[in-house]
Image: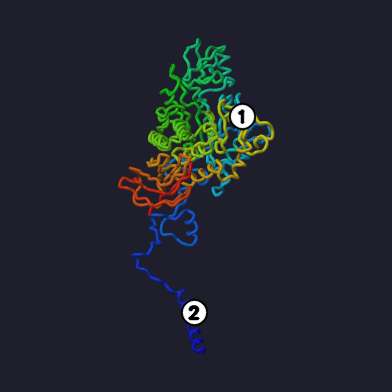
């Protein structure tokens, strides 16, 4: 009995041991009809951008992957047949307020050079610079005013800013980093203290007298804003549309035209600037009481274009034509300016972001795009004559970020007013809009080591370049990311624009399409996260099927199939668009 029990126990233990060993290799096969799916269709939920980076190190994909398309490297040269300025992101810079290098409280050319690596260090792989590829310098000529718009010498630079040689050195340093430079060219008027006007007033028999516009008696009519335009002097009344300190030049006199042609040649040929911002362009030549947009003004600008393009065909002009776009478009028909500032769109952008109105902003973007010939308008949010963005938004960082998102993804050549990228504030009078740049939390905001020409913003310890550079969620960090993205993607710079509709009224969606790239831009103009929305485009440039990958933002997006009209019908996505957020999707065929 004892032996039998021992044998049975031994056999039982052996059976248990063998069962355990074989169970680890056992596979249960279910009917295929009941198997759960473990493979998603590739055009339903594509991999994320991060997973692609991981996979591509070991696996060669069978279809194209997202990436940069026709990036800007060095000086922009133009993409898809467009000019270099359409590939450029400009930075409007007031020399007096940018950086003081010689401890006199006033910004200067050498100060700009010291801070050029902040604007663009010349290396597209770095992320510590802003990445702009163009600079517009507000007036650099000698002047009796702080702002410089009343010029006393068109052939020199303001001694407060440095010397002409230092200015040329600035140009060289900019070009070396891939930055082109345009300057303000103030042709409409001079300073009352310009030697030309002094001679014209004090010597009525002089040939220079007719360089300005005179009347023995006061004609009595007012200017476009109800202002006095006829000003008394010892030689009679002279015309000055802006104020008595800025007498208008008389362009009915060919000698004036010849002189200003020579000024233009000097800056393009002898100095080497890349173009001009043309101040007060619509007021150049009056016709009796018609003080803007006269036929003879258009004729003069057309002749001016022929002249400066003859010196340098690649020279660029952008006109300040501050009026309705119905008049602005007449200046950019191909025979006057290369571009004009789009004041209508700037105000519509700011107003609709202030009211969180995505639908109205979508309509404005489409109307403006349809109204202009491609590549002929310059976009901005505010400039040196307007309250700053952050003041308009009463300190709302989210709205400032939305404005940046629209500016740097929508059509047009963008211009960024200095300090806008860090949230500087300022409202009228004009001096408060043009205060020193905020570099750090140090005394005088790091602009100077002595008290500057104008006081800095009071909040400089919180909002400055140094502080915001260390915060990945700051306004400055967003500007850096968006500028880099625009430089890397041709569709954002020169792509056609197609407004997309959505069932969610808080989404601003649009498609940008260049010859080699298609991008779908989704901007959330609300304080809530959005998911579960549809998008539609009745007619467009698409064909076939696409995979969608985020190049900005996150999420998994289903494939998109074009309809027979090149658009798409009720594209459904459940991926989130963050509150006040931006997502940009690259469409890849396959």
- Place residue 463 in its image quadrant: top right
Instruction: Establish if 258 lies above or below 229.
Output: below
The residue sitting at the front extreme is 1
Classify the position of the C terminus by image quarter.
bottom left
Instruction: Establish if 17 lies above or below 224.
Output: below
Work out whether residue 256 or residue 493 is closer to the camera in this orientation and state it.
Answer: 493
The residue sitting at the top extreme is 217
At a point 41% along the width and 23% down the height, the residue shown is 295
Instruction: Establish if 454 lies above or below 493.
Output: above
| Circle 1 crowding by C-alpha within 10 Å: few under 14, some 14–19, many from 20 | some
Q: Position of residue 234 (x, y in %)?
A: 57, 11
| Circle 2 crowding by C-alpha within 10 Å: few under 14, some 14–19, many from 20 | few
The residue sitting at the left extreme is 564
Indicate which label's residue lies in the foreground, 1 or 2.
2
Mark 2 secondary-structure assignment: helix
Q: Position of residue 493 (x, y in %)?
A: 45, 42
Sequence-wise, the earlier of marks 1 and 2 is: 2
Work out whether residue 88 or residue 362 is closer to the camera in this orientation and state it.
Answer: 362
- Return the residue at label 2: 17
Circles 1 and 2: CB atoms closer than 8 Å = no
Color scheme of the displayed model: rainbow
507 left or right, relative to 468: left
- Return the residue at label 1: 158
Q: Position of residue 226 (x, y in %)?
A: 48, 17
Q: Is residue 559 visible?
A: yes
Determine the CA span between mark 1 and mark 2: 96 Å
Q: Position of residue 405 (x, y in %)?
A: 48, 40
Work out whether residue 340 or residue 507 is closer to the camera in this orientation and state it.
Answer: 507
Mark 1 secondary-structure assignment: loop
At a point 37% along the width and 64% down the height, the residue shown is 35
């Amino acid at each position: 009995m004892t032996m039998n029990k021992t044998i049975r126990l031994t056999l039982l233990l052996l059976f248990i041991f063998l069962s355990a060993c074989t169970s680890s290799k056992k596979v249960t096969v279910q009917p295929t009809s009941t198997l759960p799916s473990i493979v998603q269709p590739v055009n339903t939920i594509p991999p994320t951008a991060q997973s692609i980076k991981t996979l591509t190190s070991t696996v060669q994909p069978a279809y194209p992957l997202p990436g940069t398309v026709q990036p800007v490297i060095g000086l922009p040269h133009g993409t898809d047949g467009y000019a270099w300025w359409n590939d450029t992101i400009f930075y409007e810079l007031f020399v007096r307020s940018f950086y003081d290098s010689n401890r006199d409280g006033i910004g200067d050319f050498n100060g700009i050079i010291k801070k050029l690596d902040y604007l663009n260090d010349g290396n597209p792989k770095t992320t510590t610079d802003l990445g702009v590829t163009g600079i517009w310098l507000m007036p650099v000529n000698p002047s009796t005013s702080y702002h410089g718009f009343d010029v006393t010498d068109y052939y020199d630079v303001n001694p407060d800013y440095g010397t002409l040689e230092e200015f040329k050195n600035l140009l060289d340093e900019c070009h070396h980093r891939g930055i082109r430079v345009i300057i303000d060219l103030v042709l409409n008027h001079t300073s009352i203290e310009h030697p030309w006007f002094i001679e014209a007033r004090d010597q009525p028999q002089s040939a220079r007298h007719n360089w300005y516009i005179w009347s023995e008696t006061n004609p009595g009519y007012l200017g476009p804003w109800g202002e006095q335009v006829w000003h008394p002097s010892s030689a009679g009344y002279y015309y000055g549309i802006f104020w008595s300190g800025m007498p208008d030049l008389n362009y009915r006199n060919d000698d004036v035209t010849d002189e200003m042609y020579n000024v233009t040649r000097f800056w393009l040929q002898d100095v080497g600037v890349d173009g001009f911002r043309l101040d007060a362009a619509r007021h150049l030549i009056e016709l009796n009481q018609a003080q803007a947009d006269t036929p003879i003004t258009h004729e003069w600008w057309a002749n001016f274009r022929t002249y400066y393009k003859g010196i340098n065909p690649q020279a660029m002009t952008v006109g300040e034509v501050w009026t309705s776009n119905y008049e602005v478009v007449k200046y950019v028909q191909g025979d006057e300016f290369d571009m004009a500032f789009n004041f209508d769109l700037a105000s519509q952008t700011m107003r609709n972001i202030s009211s969180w109105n995505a639908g109205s902003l979508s309509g404005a973007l489409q109307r403006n795009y349809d109204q202009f010939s491609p590549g002929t308008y310059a976009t901005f949010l505010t400039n040196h004559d307007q309250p700053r963005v952050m003041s308009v938004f009463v300190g709302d960082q989210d709205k400032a970020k939305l404005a940046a998102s629209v500016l740097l993804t929508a059509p047009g050549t963008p211009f960024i007013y200095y300090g806008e990228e860090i949230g500087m504030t300022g409202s009228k009078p004009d001096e408060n809009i043009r205060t020193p740049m905020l570099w750090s939390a140090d005394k005088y905001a790091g602009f100077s080591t002595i008290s500057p020409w104008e006081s800095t913003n009071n909040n400089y310890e919180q909002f400055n370049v140094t502080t915001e550079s260390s915060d990945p969620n700051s306004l400055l960090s967003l500007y850096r990311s968006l500028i880099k993205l625009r430089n890397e993607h041709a569709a954002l710079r020169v792509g056609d624009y197609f407004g997309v509709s959505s069932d969610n009224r808080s989404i601003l969606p649009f498609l940008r399409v260049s010859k080699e790239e298609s991008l779908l831009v989704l901007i959330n103009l609300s304080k809530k996260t959005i998911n579960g929305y549809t998008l539609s485009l009745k007619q467009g440039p698409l064909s076939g099927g696409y995979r969608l990958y985020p190049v900005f933002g996150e999420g998994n997006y289903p494939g998109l199939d074009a309809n027979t009209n090149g658009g798409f019908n009720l594209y459904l996505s459940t991926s989130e668009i963050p509150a006040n957020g931006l997502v940009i999707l690259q469409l890849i065929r396959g």
